[in-house]
Image (cartoon, helix red, strand yellow):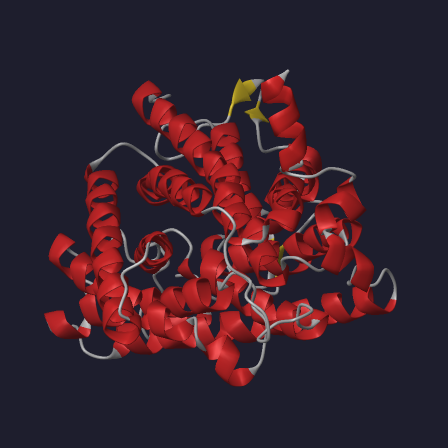
Amino acid sequence: MELDTGATAWMLMSASLVLLMTPGLAFFYGGMVRSKSVLNMMMMSFGAIAVVAVIYVLWGWSMSYGSDIGGIIGNPFDQFGLQGAIYDGGEFIIDDYGVPGIVGVGFQSTFAIITVALISGAIADRVKFGTWMVFAALWVTFAYFPMAHMVWGGGLLSGDGPFAGIAAPIDFAGGTVVHINAGAAALVLALVVGKRKGFGKEPMRPHSLPFVMLGAALLWFGWFGFNAGSAFTSDGFAGLAWVNTTTATAAAIIGWLITEKLRDGSATSLGAASGAVAGLVAITPAAGSVSPVGSLAVGVIAGVLSALAVGLKYKFGYDDSLDVVGVHLVAGLWGTLAIGFLATDTGLFYGGGVNQLAVQAIIAVIAIVFSAVVTLVIALILKGTLGWRVSEEAEVGGIDLAVHGETGYETVPQGSIIKEVRA
């Protein structure tokens, strides 16, 4: 295959856009927590970049796309350290789209990074940074890489797997691999770690809604690399994914705000930002298989469902701090199932019967169970060894200062300001 410089440029740009999503998530999550823990929250995203980017080069790519072991994982030693993934006979390996394989490695590594970072929102304000870093390394190895292999690497949940006899499973850009995977992990981790001090008894409002809006904007911008980049070249599918991503996100904002207005009497900026993310999540698996009109249905329903789902933590008593479960798990599930209804080739509403819907439901259930079990094992091991919780004093007084020796905002006593002005 000859090098296609246009496709290569597009994939390099897409990889950069997806990497931008994790700092964007840092702003999104950082604004949603209280001011005393903003730096810790943002550091959890940057920590995910540091850990996962290193591991991906060593064994992550090989576990995701190496030779198959039982339909669950790729052989971690097959291309350890990217041996055999870059060159063939001294020349760069070129994939079927005319893109060097090393560009694909970079692109896929950014997916692993953002997936790990997403989980951090469920345990904001209360965990040890060191334990989080160890968790990131273990979870990406034993949960993310196997899931990527099962869905995208020719494994159990792919078009080469046993369920393809029903219909070929569809996950265009990460409904199961990223969002259901991270959402299920977030729920388990929130339950194992436990509630924040004062949860349900005192207000825990976002300290900076402008940060939240900025983070949502960066996520939306980066998501074009996430979804349109998953066409793997600059073609019509990339254009379809781009348009579907825009329309679904916009529709989800409207769905969330209408729900919020009817339920609470106000359409909020936090709701708009959260609705945007819900729409982005829902369209991710379906971006290449639904029409732009279908994407509107995917988005608006995602906005409504997620707006309703974020309140479940108060009803059931689990502390998912920043609504990872309500947004990523719920919208990811809806987007994965929506393909069964709205895929233009195989969807139920387009005369395709129930097969696509059935296989989408199967892969979603397997993804939830697999992620939950792996996360539970890792979380319990870490709870019994390193421990998850910071001290009560650190949690109440401010995790930023206690853990990182810094504060996000320096406050000056009012009297000092007056004296300075008078001087």
Looking at the rendering, in which quadrant would you find the N terminus? top left
Residue in view at x 47 percent, y 34 percent:
20
Q: Position of residue 237 (x, y in %)?
A: 23, 43
Q: Where is residue 19 in the image (x, y as percent from the top left)?
A: 49, 35
Residue in view at x 83 percent, y 63 percent:
387
Residue in view at x 13 percent, y 73 percent:
349
From the viewer's perspective, is 130 left or right of 421? right
Q: Position of residue 359 (x, y in %)?
A: 35, 74
Q: Position of residue 370 (x, y in %)?
A: 58, 71
Q: Which of 226 and 167 is in front in this view?
A: 226
Is residue 36 depicted above or below 314 in this figure?
above
From the viewer's perspective, is 387 left or right of 309? right
Residue at far right of view:
385
Quadrant housing residue 242: top left
Is residue 213 depicted above or below 143 in this figure?
above
Tell me how many marks there are.
Answer: 0
Q: Can residue 344 be seen in this view?
A: no
Looking at the rendering, in which quadrant would you find the C terminus? top right
